[in-house]
């Protein structure tokens, strides 16, 4: 059973991770010429614009989840497949950057032997970093409607893509059932742990360069 302190830390961390993920989708689409997300008020960091209730609860209780998809019109892209793939990758990439920077900051705070208030901030940053990386790893799974499927589509013929879209509802249901029964948890956990370890190692190296440590 999680205590109150856990929820005080994890809820704002999840809101930040989800918001930057979806805003990055919208920003990438905007840069590629699609203004749809901007016109629908999704080019911002307001969590209320992006939250999917079920995906948010999964973030809180399981450490990974999803948000309300950003609307994208591929007909604005010069290369539709490539534009969709770039827009899709922007979300997880932003999570990895946020996660890495947050964990590096946590390591620096840890080695600085700061006071209790600053150490509390460090704990929040570590939670934010881990959640953000978990969100990025989960969304890179090549399963519709996750971001990784848009990257997979870059290498599939149009006939195969149309078949996937035809059965996307069933695939989405299978994905939810798989999540419920923990089918992807080990894969996501392995990727998440590996990237968190890389971020911690990077933080230690930065701390050494700055002369921090015991």
Image (tube, rainbow, N blue to C red):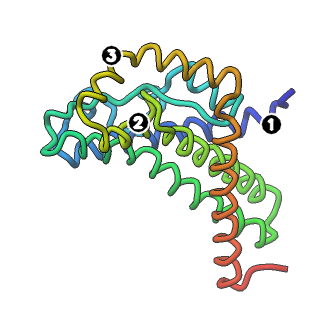
Question: Could you say where residue 207 lies in the image, as x and y percent from the top left?
Answer: 69, 77
Tag 3, which secondary structure?
A: helix
Q: Is residue 122 above or below residue 85?
A: below
Front of the two marks 1 and 3:
3
Name the foreground residue: 16 vs 121. Answer: 16
Say what secondary structure mark 1 lies in. Answer: helix
Report x, y in % for residue 162.
27, 23
- Rounded to the nearest angstrom, the CA distance separating label 1 from label 2 is 36 Å
User: What residue is at 52 percent from the left and 15 percent from the top?
Assistant: 173
Judging by the rendered image, the residue that carries numbered circle 2 is: 149
Left or right, 108 with reference to 150: right
Crowd rating for badge 1 (residues with CA inside 10 Å; few <14, some 14–19, many 20+): few
Who comes first in sequence, dot 2 or dot 3? Answer: 2
Label 3: which residue? 166
Note whether 178 is above or below 77 in the view shown. above
Quadrant assignment for the N terminus:
top right
* Left or right: 203 as drawn, with respect to 101: right
Examine the image and state in which quarter residue 34 appears: top left
Mark-to-mark CA distance, 1 and 3? 44 Å
Q: Quadrant of the C terminus?
A: bottom right
Mark 2 to mark 3 CA distance (whole Å): 14 Å
Residue of label 1? 5
Looking at the image, which is closer to me, 169 or 54? 169
Q: Is residue 126 above or below residue 171?
A: below
- The mark tally for this picture is 3
Name the residue at 74% across, 32% down.
Answer: 7
Q: Position of residue 184 (x, y in %)?
A: 64, 33
Residue at disc 2, secondary structure = helix
Name the spot of residue 176 as percent of width and height, x first. Answer: 57, 20
* Circle nearer the N terminus (1, 2): 1
């Amino acid at each position: 059973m999680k205590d109150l302190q856990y929820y005080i830390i994890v809820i704002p961390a999840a809101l930040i991770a989800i918001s930057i993920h979806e805003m990055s989708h919208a920003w990438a689409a905007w840069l590629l010429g699609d203004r749809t997300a901007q016109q629908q008020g999704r080019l911002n960091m307001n969590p209320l614009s992006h939250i999917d209730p079920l995906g948010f609860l999964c973030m809180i209780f399981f450490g990974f989840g999803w948000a309300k998809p950003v609307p994208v019109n591929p007909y604005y892209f010069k290369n539709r497949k490539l534009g969709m793939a770039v827009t899709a990758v922007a979300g997880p990439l932003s999570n990895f950057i946020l996660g890495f920077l947050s964990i590096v900051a946590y390591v620096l705070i840890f080695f600085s032997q700061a006071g209790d208030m600053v150490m509390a901030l460090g704990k929040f940053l570590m939670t934010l970093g881990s959640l953000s990386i978990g969100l990025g790893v989960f969304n890179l799974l090549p399963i519709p409607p996750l971001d990784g499927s848009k990257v997979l589509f870059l290498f599939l013929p149009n006939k195969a893509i149309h078949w996937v879209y035809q059965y996307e509802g069933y695939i989405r249901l299978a994905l939810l059932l798989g999540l419920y029964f923990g089918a992807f948890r080990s894969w996501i956990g392995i990727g998440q742990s590996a990237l968190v370890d890389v971020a911690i190692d990077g933080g230690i190296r930065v701390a050494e360069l700055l002369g921090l440590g015991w």
